[in-house]
Image (spheres, rainbow, N blue to C red):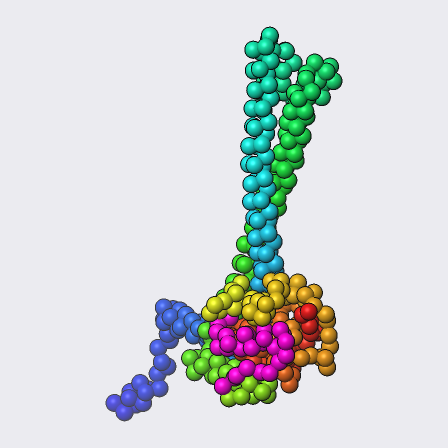
């Protein structure tokens, strides 16, 4: 019995079945796959500072598209105004043409009652008299008053044709501008959406910290500019000073592409409004505001001068003194003070 027990204790274990091997292999493969997928799906999360850097870059790209959108919008408004004026002129011209034809008709009626209507006049009163207006033989058969009336009709018809052609051309331009506007708006909104998606990768505390940092930076810039703890008006002279004082009343408002107030602004919308409050009309976009006065360097800046940033001039603000700018910054910072060293300064513009 002991010998049998000994033999039994040394029997080889039963080899695994084919089914068991398949199950074990499948489990091992799945574990490796899940581990690999987990590693691929969970890359290192970007830090708060890395997210801020990427978001700031997207804000810049959005602002570039926004300023181009603003330029297109200004062009659209101008075209709509010109088309409306042309259409009014065409309508008035048509009324004048109808009046001239009525005058000629009265002459023809009088001539008919006096002994018959000349066939040339009948032709001129037809629906298509143009072919006869240039025929000297026809005009020679008319009285002096009739010749004068017909000449006026001819001139008016030519003028109306030219105005209608001009209006048609402007309508085509308007359609092209509207298409461009849609593209620029879409591009700006896409960049803002990408920025928001990046911000959403942060925790609520991290997003709150970014806003807090922006507020602290703004207050430090306000203090440096001489705005004091409450961000009060910075002293400035003349209309530039008045424009800066007006802009500062909007401190804390939000940034939004294409807006010109009263509660949200983009950068050039704020500067245009501020100078308007000082009684000075300047243009709408950064690209045109850069030519609304005399260009000056950093050392010549005075409070209220326009200051432009980035090589393509897609951002503008108002010089606030002591190396600070007051501007509509971006969707995170809103309307605030900021140190000019944070952005690549190009030049200032003193509005006359």
Residue reaching furthest front? 114
Q: Position of residue 125 (x, y in %)?
A: 59, 18
**In magenta segment, residue 234:** yes
**Percent of width and height locating residue 300:** 72, 79
The C terminus: image quadrant: bottom right
Q: Nearer the viewer, residue 52 or 144?
A: 144
Vertical placement of residue 68 versus 133, above or below:
below
- Residue at the far bottom in the pictured view: 2
Residue farthest top in this picture: 115
Identified at 60% across, 21% down, the residue is: 104
Taking depth in this image into account, of 3 and 242 the one nearest to the observer is 242
Q: Where is residue 245 drawn, in percent x and y?
A: 56, 77
Is residue 14 placed above or below 3 in the rendered structure?
A: above
Q: Quadrant of residue 131?
A: top right
Instruction: Assess whether residue 193 is covered by the magenta stretch.
Output: no
Q: Is residue 15 left or right of residue 161?
A: left
Left or right: 291, with 127 as reference point: right
The answer to whether residue 315 of the structure is visible from this angle is: yes
- Which residue appears at 52% of the width and 65% of the height? 260
**Which range is magenta?**
230-256
x then y, percent, for residue 231: 52, 84
What residue is shown at x 65% (from left), y 34% (from top)? 159
Q: Quadrant of residue 55?
A: bottom right
Report whether residue 49 is seen.
no
The quadrant where residue 133 appears: top right
- Say which quadrant the N terminus sits in: bottom left
């Amino acid at each position: 019995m002991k010998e049998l027990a000994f033999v039994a204790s040394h029997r080889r274990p039963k080899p695994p079945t084919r089914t068991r091997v398949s199950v074990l292999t499948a489990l091992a493969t799945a574990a490796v796959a899940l581990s690999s997928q987990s590693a691929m799906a969970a890359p290192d999360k970007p830090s708060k500072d890395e997210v801020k850097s990427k978001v700031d870059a997207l804000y810049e790209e959005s602002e570039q598209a926004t300023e181009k959108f603003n330029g297109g919008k200004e062009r659209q408004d101008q075209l709509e105004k010109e088309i409306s004026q042309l259409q009014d002129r065409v309508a008035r011209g048509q009324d004048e043409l109808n009046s001239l034809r009525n005058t000629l008709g009265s002459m023809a009626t009088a001539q008919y009652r006096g002994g018959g209507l000349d066939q040339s006049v009948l032709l001129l009163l037809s629906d298509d008299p143009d072919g006869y207006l240039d025929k000297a033989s026809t005009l020679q058969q008319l009285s002096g008053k009739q010749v004068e009336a017909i000449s006026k009709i001819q001139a008016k018809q030519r003028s109306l044709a030219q105005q209608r052609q001009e209006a048609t051309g402007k309508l085509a331009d308007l359609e092209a501008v509207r298409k461009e506007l849609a593209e620029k708006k879409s591009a700006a909104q896409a960049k803002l959406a990408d920025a928001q998606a990046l911000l959403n990768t942060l925790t609520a505390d991290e997003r709150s910290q970014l806003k807090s940092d922006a507020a602290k930076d703004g207050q430090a810039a306000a203090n440096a500019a001489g705005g004091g703890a409450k961000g009060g008006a910075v002293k400035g002279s003349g209309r530039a000073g008045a424009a800066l004082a007006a802009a500062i009343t909007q401190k804390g408002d939000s940034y939004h592409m294409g807006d010109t107030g009263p509660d949200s602004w983009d950068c050039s919308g704020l500067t245009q409004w501020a100078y308007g409050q000082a009684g000075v009309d300047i243009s709408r976009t950064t690209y045109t505001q850069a030519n609304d006065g005399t260009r000056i360097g950093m050392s010549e800046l005075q409070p209220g001068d326009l200051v432009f940033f980035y090589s393509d001039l897609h951002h503008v603000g108002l010089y606030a003194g002591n190396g600070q700018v007051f501007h509509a910054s971006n969707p995170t910072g809103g309307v605030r003070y900021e140190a000019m060293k944070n952005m690549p300064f190009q030049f200032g513009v003193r509005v006359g």
